[in-house]
């Protein structure tokens, strides 16, 4: 009797400690307060210009975005796989958004198993995570030559096993990356994901030694990663913690290996929001955080994403962390919502990226057609 009571108590405690975050993540407690989105316009393009995950602003007026229509059937991050008639490929698109009308051009016709996710730009090179369906994940390196992409390298490493986001660091093609989970697929991944076991990591790839290693473990669904302009700081979004952490980057003298400080130097909560990608605005020092304020709606969409299934588009929320603001020392009050929508205007936002010069905010959505462009004076 005593034993089963103890079991019951432990069970109830476990349930409660897990239930609480799940209720927050699910969106039950979150009310959507749409911003005034009249200054936003959808940029549409050719067939296949949809399901875009990441956006890179290469220069004022010019953006690259990674899009994968196959996400409607296969979501590698959430381990959703559904029967389909044919395999579609992902592509990278170049958007000249300040021309009138904006132009959208496919610049990389995906190879046979190309499903791009996070991207980073290092001088004239674009590093793109590929979550191939029939091969281990990789980072594909492309050179931008006169507006086209030339493939130069494939980086594969056992520790780059579930890469989600990537941010270049240093001068030799090195980068930080997140592994959103430890397990790649199947029951272990289901348990890791739904029991909220923090097995995700922040990793570093040293391009000179071609080594990849863990710089920070124990993360709960780490997603977007971005360095600041000086590269002395790295920001990591933890989806299931609904927060973004700021770490100081420290190069350890003894072994020449890069470490991030053991404790985060700062963090910001985005209440009720499964935070996704990050974008650091080098001009303003703002960190643009994109996220999903209704996790349950996103999971539903994930599992029934085709147009015929007619599942409502999950809502979007994009907030700005004014990281360099000196008007207050209180981190939480340095946060401002810049885009919020119930999914009817533009849902499933995974990235918000700002072009400071042109006062634009660009938004990509995991299950949306095209991308969104808004007038914003941030
Ligand atoms: C990368 O590896 C090279 C060669 O081993 C080493 O000299 C360098 O310090 C490493 N850089 C970092 C940031 O770890």
Image (cartoon, rainbow, N blue to C red):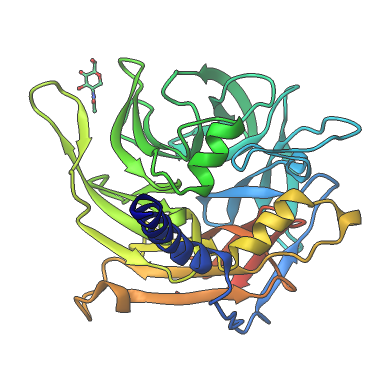
**Residue 343, position as x, y percentages in the image:** 70, 70
Specify whether 73 is left or right of 247. Answer: right
Query: How far across and down, in percent of the image, does residue 238 sit?
Result: 41, 52
User: Residue 147: in sight, yes or no?
Assistant: no
Location of the C terminus by quadrant is bottom left
Residue 310 higher or lower than 40, as above or below:
above
Q: Residue at x 37, y 74 (%)?
A: 335
Q: Nearer the viewer, residue 39 or 70?
A: 70
Residue 328 visible to the viewer: yes
Instruction: Estimate the x, y position of residue 196 in percent, counting from the top left.
Output: 45, 49
Left or right, 371 with respect to 211, comes to right
| Image quarter of residue 342 | bottom right
Determine the residue positioned at 40% across, 48% down. Answer: 220
Q: x, y (%) of residue 6?
A: 34, 55
Ligand 1 found in image quarter: top left
Q: Note whether 46 is above or below 378 in the view shown.
A: above
Residue 295, picture quadrant: bottom right
């Amino acid at each position: 009797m005593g034993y089963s009571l103890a079991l019951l108590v432990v069970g109830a405690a476990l349930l409660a400690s897990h239930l609480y975050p799940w209720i927050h993540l699910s969106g039950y407690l979150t009310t959507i307060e749409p911003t005034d989105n009249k200054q936003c316009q959808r940029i549409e393009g050719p067939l296949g210009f949809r399901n875009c995950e990441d956006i890179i602003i290469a220069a004022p007026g010019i953006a690259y975005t990674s899009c994968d229509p196959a996400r409607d059937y296969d979501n590698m991050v959430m381990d959703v796989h559904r029967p389909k008639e044919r395999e579609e490929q992902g592509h990278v698109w170049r958007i000249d958004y300040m021309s009138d009308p904006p132009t959208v051009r496919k610049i990389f016709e995906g190879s046979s198993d190309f499903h791009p996710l996070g991207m980073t730009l290092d001088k004239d090179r674009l590093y793109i995570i590929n979550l191939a369906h029939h091969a281990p994940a990789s980072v594909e390196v492309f050179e931008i030559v006169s507006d086209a992409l030339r493939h130069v390298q494939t980086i594969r490493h056992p520790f780059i096993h579930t890469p989600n986001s990537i941010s270049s660091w240093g001068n030799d093609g090195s980068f930080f990356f997140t592994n959103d989970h430890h397990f790649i697929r199947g029951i272990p991944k289901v348990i890791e994901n739904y029991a909220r076991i923090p097995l995700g990591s922040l990793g570093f790839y040293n391009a000179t030694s071609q080594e990849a290693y863990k710089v920070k473990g124990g993360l709960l669904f780490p997603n977007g990663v971005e360095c600041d302009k000086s590269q002395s700081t790295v920001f990591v979004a933890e989806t299931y913690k609904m927060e973004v952490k700021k770490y100081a980057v420290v190069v350890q003298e003894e072994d020449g290996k890069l470490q991030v400080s053991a404790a985060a130097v700062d963090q910001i909560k985005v209440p009720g929001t499964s935070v996704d990608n990050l974008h650091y605005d080098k001009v303003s020092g703002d960190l643009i955080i994109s996220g999903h304020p209704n996790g349950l709606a996103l999971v539903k969409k994930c599992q029934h994403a085709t147009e015929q299934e007619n599942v409502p588009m999950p809502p979007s929320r994009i907030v700005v962390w004014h990281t360099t603001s000196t008007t207050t020392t209180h981190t939480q009050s340095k946060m401002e919502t810049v885009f919020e929508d119930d999914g009817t205007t533009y849902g499933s936002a995974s990235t918000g990226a700002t072009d400071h010069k042109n006062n634009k905010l660009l938004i990509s959505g995991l299950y949306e057609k095209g991308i969104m462009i808004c007038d914003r004076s941030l």
